[in-house]
Amino acid sequence: MVFADSAVPPSVSVQQKLDSVRDKRRNLFDAIPVPLIVTQALFGAIAVLPHRTRFGQHIYAIGGNLQAARFTGVQIVRVYSDNYFSP
């Protein structure tokens, strides 16, 4: 046998190798702080809101040209109230 000369039984050495792989995997995820992940998720959601939703596009339209937004059918009062008075 290959392991006959070693002082460590084969099952222990395999278990140690598995533990070291698990420890490396844990250390990889521990290296990224949780607040950083949460911040990135919030920034992603905030970046999507103005560009991908109708509400965000209406806000951009009103900010660009109020009269043009009114002519395109944006309900100015509703968007203002939703934007400034929402909970």
Image (spheres, rainbow, N blue to C red):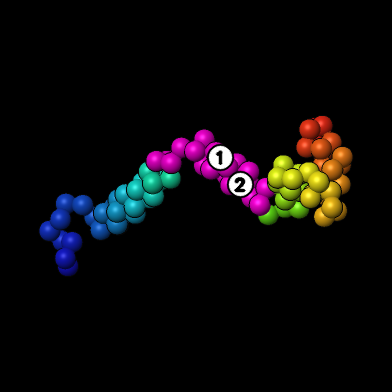
Q: Identify which residue, 35 or 59, lies in the foreground.
A: 59
Binning the other alpha carbons within 10 Å of mark 1 as few (below 14), some (14 to 19) or many (20 upward) gives few
Q: Position of residue 44 (x, y in %)?
A: 58, 47
Q: Which residue is mark 2?
A: 47
Binning the other alpha carbons within 10 Å of mark 2 as few (below 14), some (14 to 19) or many (20 upward) gives few
The kind of residue tagged 2 is Ala
Q: How many marks?
A: 2
Label 1, label 2: how far apart the Cα atoms are = 14 Å
Q: Quadrant of the N terminus?
A: bottom left
Q: Is residue 50 visible?
A: yes
Q: Earlier in the sequence, mark 1 or mark 2?
A: 1
Residue plotted at (31% across, 49% down): 20
Q: Nearer the viewer, mark 1 or mark 2?
A: 2
Q: Which of the 4 quarters of the picture holds residue 43? A: top right
Q: Identify which residue, 46 or 73, lies in the foreground.
A: 73
Magenta stretch holds residue 33: yes
Residue plotted at (43% across, 45% down): 29
**Helix, strand or loop at mark 2:** helix
Q: Which residue is mark 1?
A: 38
Q: Identify which residue, 47 or 26, lies in the foreground.
A: 47
Residue plotted at (16% across, 51% down): 7
Magenta stretch holds residue 43: yes
